[in-house]
Image (spheres, coloured by chain):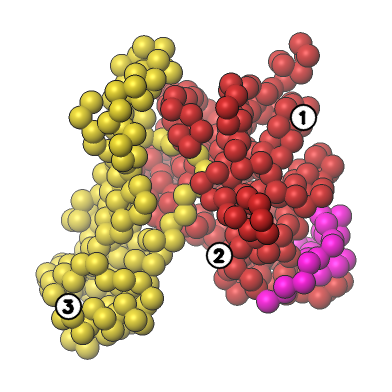
Chain colours: A yellow, B red
Amino acid sequence: MSGGPAYATVYLTVEQAQALLFPGATFQPDTRTLTDEQAKAIAHASGVPVRNKQIKAWRVSTGGWFIVDEVVGKHEFIPFALALDDKGAVKGIEILEYREAYGGQIRDPEWRKQFLDATAGKKLQLDRNIRNISGATLSCKHLTDGVERLLVTYDLVLKKSS
Amino acid sequence: MERAQPWLGTLVSIRVSGMAASDAHRAIDTAFREIASVHCLMSFHDHDSDVARLNRAVSLQSIQVHSYTYEVLRHAIAFSASTQGCFDVTVGAELMNWKFLPSVGRSSIHYGSWRDIELLPDNCVVFHRPLCIDLGGIAKGFAVDRATECLQAHGAQQSIINAGGDIRVQGRDAERIRLRAESFTDAVPVLELTKGSVASSSGYLHRRWCHERFYGPHVNGVDRSPAPTDRFVCVVAETCMTADALTKVVMVRGQESAAVLRKFGASAYMYDAGREWQRLDAEEVMTA
C-alpha cells in the first residue's frame, strides 16, 4: 500500500454537471484571474479566505453562470459545480468528486492488515469496493463557505461583466 | 449513477442502478428535491423553517406546520415515550449552550420537555411552554426515507442514499458499508446490508471543551447531561429515521438500550474506547 485516498468517488464530469444544471444550453468559458485587490475584497466580504485566484467560470447561453471550484477540508477534497441564474441566485450545486484521506494512517501496513482481517480475508480495494461510509456526521460548512465565497465573487467580479 | 449535493448540514449522496441514465437523473433530481424540502422545513438556522417558527412561538400559540414536520414530531414524541424521555427534541437550549447550535436569541434555559409538545388536528402544533426544539437527530433519517420512496416511485431497482452517514439501501444487491470509527480503533468494521438502514453517531469528532469538561453533540433528554464522547454507535433498522433516532438513545444508554432496540426491530453495534465491540439486540436480551 503506497498511500492514496481512503475513499474516492467521481460523481459527474464538468460536462455532465453543465448538462444537468442548464439543460440544452451552451457554455462559453470565461476564466478569470483575480487581482490581489479583488481577492482581498472577496475574502473580506465573504469572511472566507481566497486560496485560488483563478475562477473557472462559464457564461451560459440561456443566462446565468456555471462555476467550478473546490474546497479542502481536514480530510477531504471536494471539487464542485455551482450554477447561478441570470440574477446571481443559486440554481443548483453538484458535487463533482469526493476524496477522503486519513493522512499517515492509510500508509501504515498494520492498518491495512487490520482492514483485511476485519473482512474475513476478502480482498477489498479501499477506494473501489467500499464507497459507503457511516460515521459521525461530517459538516459541510467548508462547502457552504465555498459557495458564499463564489457568490461574493459573482457580485464583485462576474456581475459587472454580465 | 451517483450524485451528491450539500443538504441538511452535510453531504448527501444518491446512487441508483438498473435504469437508463436519463431516468436515473430524473429520479435523483426528484429525490434531492424531497431532501431539499425537508431541509427547508426543519432547519434550525433558517428563519422561515417550521422549526424556527415553532421555536419563536409563545406558550399555547397554535402553529400550523407542513405535514412532514408534523410527522417527524409525531415520531419524535413516540421515540421519547418509548425511551422515558432519553430521546427528546427539546434539547435545543443545551445544544446552544454547548455551542453545537448557533444562538437564536432565546437564550434562557427552557425546562420543558417533549411532554410539553401537543399535536392538534390539521398539522397544528402547540407548545405548552416556550421550547427550543432541534430535529437534527431525526430529520436526516426522515429525509433519506422520503427520498428512497421517491426513487422507488421512479422505478429505481437498486438505490443507496447516504446523508452524512445515515444510509438506506433499497434493492436486491448487498451494499458494504464502512463504519468510520477510526478515532477509536485501527480496525475498520464493515457491514453488509441488503435492504434497510444504518446510522452512526459518535461525539468524539465534534466534542468541545466547555464548562471544564468535554461535551459531545448528544444530550440525555432526562437529566440534560452530555452523552459519552468516547463511544461509537451504529444502529441498523428498517427505516433510516428509526436508525437515526436510536443512535442517540444508544449513545446515552449504552447496553441498557437493548429493550428499546427490540421494540423498534433494530440492532446496534457499540464501541467504547479501550473495550471490545458489543452487539446490542434482541438476541442478547433473550440470552441475558
Chain on which label 1 sits: B
Question: Toward which corner of the image does residue A150 lie, by quadrant?
Answer: bottom left
- Give the mark nearer the N terminus: 1 vs 2: 2
Q: Judge depth for marks 1 and 2 and give the one in front.
A: 1
Q: Which residue is mark 2?
A: B40
B222 inside magenta stretch: no
Q: What's the mark number on residue B256? A: 1
Q: Is residue B181 above or below residue A144?
A: above
Which three-letter amino acid code belongs to the residue tagged 3? Leu
Mark whose residue sits in front, 2 or 3? 3
Question: Which residue is at the far front?
Answer: B212
CB within 8 Å, label 2 to label 3: no
Q: Residues within 10 Å of mark 1 (few under 14, many from 20)?
A: few
Q: Is residue B234 above or below residue B137?
A: above
Task: Tell me the subunit letter for badge 3.
Answer: A
Q: Are marks 1 and 2 on the same chain?
A: yes
Residue A34 numbered tag: 3
Residue A153 disc label: none
Q: Residues within 10 Å of mark 3 (few under 14, many from 20)?
A: some
Callout 2: chain: B
* Contact, mark 3 vs mark 1 (Cβ under 8 Å): no
Query: Foreground: A109 or B81?
Result: A109
